[in-house]
Image (cartoon, rainbow, N blue to C red):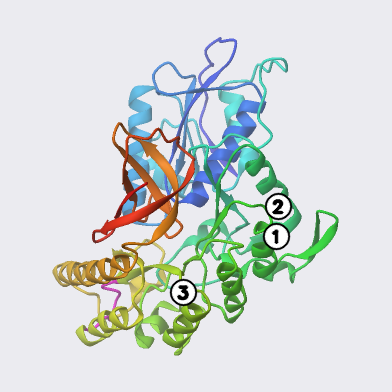
Amino acid sequence: MTDTATLPPPTDRAAPKISFVSLGCPKALVDSERIITRLRAEGYELSRSHQGADLVLVNTCGFLDSAKAESLAAIGDALKENGRVIVTGCMGAEPDQIRAAHPSVLAITGPQQYESVLAAVHEAAPPKHDPFLDLVPPQGIKLTPRHYAYLKISEGCNNRCTFCIIPKLRGDLVSRPLGEVMREAEKLVAAGVKELLVVSQDTSAYGIDVKYAESQWRDRSWRTKFLDLAQALGELGVWVRMQYVYPYPHVDEVIPLMAEGKILPYIDIPFQHAHPDVLRRMKRPAHQEKTVERIRRWREICPDLTIRSTFIVGFPGETEKEFEFLLDWLDEVGLDRVGCFKYEPVAGATSNALEGQVPPEVMERRWHRFMKKQAEISARRLKRKVGTRQQVLVDEVGPTVVRARSKGDAPEIDGSVFIHTRRKLAVGELVTVKIDRAGDYDLFASL
């Protein structure tokens, strides 16, 4: 469903120009890429600035109140600089809130409503397609650098975590057929992508909704399942990074593929907390009392495994004892890469009704204690790599310093490997370096 206002007549241009703002997580970025690909295929041009564009399209985030505020601010900036704005994305599921702040937006659509977005754009700035000029590459239009790309394997989520409203915004799990995912992955690799980052709301639940239905790829049948997907992607010869993985028992089956070098020895698991009582209040899926033992077993199978996670401090009812349990758990497990968020009462989340809301000042102190503890753990983990040789992927090239990432570093969220060299390297190049020293989060290397 699209919420629309009366549209002023579009400007008369040979090729309508669209300015695009993409906010939120990598899954939303993939949505933006799909919309942009469709628009380019229809002859639209992309503008680097709001001024001079025929309209602005803002893909919003509505997960946290702070994200909603950022989205509303972006819409306001677009209206101020351009005046013709269409809104889509997660916050589009709550059009009244957007209309209350910005009544003059042209149209509002919800997440994943690609056809509604295109219809709104068509009405505001009708396309003028020239089939001889408007050529779209087979892999579509990407908003990431050319050497890596996000590969979204499903929409929605079946979990009902009390702090999260994603199922309300994006619905239940809908998995893409494995063959469809793999054909997209092949096009990306053919276009020069060196790293595929597999994303979804719940990556290891892939295929549950379709009962692991079989799908055709490269003249054979594959199950629409996490393990099969990992095996298939491992045949492409590029870095494959698994993100947003919940620790269901069948995740154990993928660890040997990491040890064999089929996919990267990297797994992103959003544990969110460690204390059983807090996890029960969160209604987190796949929690097991033997998580520590499983992680130890994973590392025995794949010694180079990097484990990343995210946590929430200050969740309603979190006691000092429960928080100290979390710190002790971090020490015991020794996760490599960790992010931490202070609990935020998202409108519509059932956790808001829980007793024992943690005061902001207590939450702030716990967050600093958590980050201090994890910085020590991270430095200790990284120090083990000093003196080793590591393959890295170049992200940015300077006159004497090159910024790259190791197999243990996802873009935007993890650390970097800084290479001091005058040798001319190229963005997207894979090189082997010697690790000379380590900081809390970054590594420093030479060729």
Whether residue 16 is situated above or below residue 56 in the rendered picture: above
Q: Disc 1 marks which residue? A: 232
Q: What stretch is highlighted in magenta?
A: 313-319
- Left or right: residue 326 compared with residue 361: right
**Residue type, label 2:** Met
Whether residue 241 is situated above or below residue 49 in the rendered picture: below
Along the viewing direction, whichever of 156 and 429 lies nearer the viewer: 429
Q: Which residue is drawn at 35% across and 77% down?
A: 273
Q: Where is residue 417 in the image (x, y as percent from the top left)?
A: 34, 51
Q: Look at the magenta stretch and give its main secondary structure.
A: loop
Tag 3–tag 1 contact (CB < 8 Å) = no
Pointer 3 or 2: first along the chain: 2
Pointer 3 or 1: first along the chain: 1
**Residue type, label 3:** Pro
Along the viewing direction, whichever of 56 and 247 lies nearer the viewer: 247
Q: Where is residue 314 in the image (x, y as percent from the top left)?
A: 26, 73
Quarter of image, res 193: top right
Pointer 1 or 2: first along the chain: 2
As measured in the structure, the alpha-carbon distance from the residue carrying label 1 to the one carrying label 2 is 7 Å
Quarter of image, res 282: bottom left
Disc 1 crowd, CA 10 A, few/some/many (<14, 14-19, 20+): some
Q: Which residue is drawn at 40% across and 23% down?
A: 50
User: What SS does tag 3 mark?
Assistant: loop
Q: In which quadrant will I find the N terminus?
A: top right
Q: Disc 2 marks which residue? A: 182
As measured in the structure, the alpha-carbon distance from the residue carrying label 3 to the one carrying label 1 is 23 Å
Q: Position of residue 207 (x, y in %)?
A: 69, 67
Tag 1–tag 2 contact (CB < 8 Å) = yes
Disc 3 crowd, CA 10 A, few/some/many (<14, 14-19, 20+): few
As measured in the structure, the alpha-carbon distance from the residue carrying label 3 to the one carrying label 2 is 28 Å
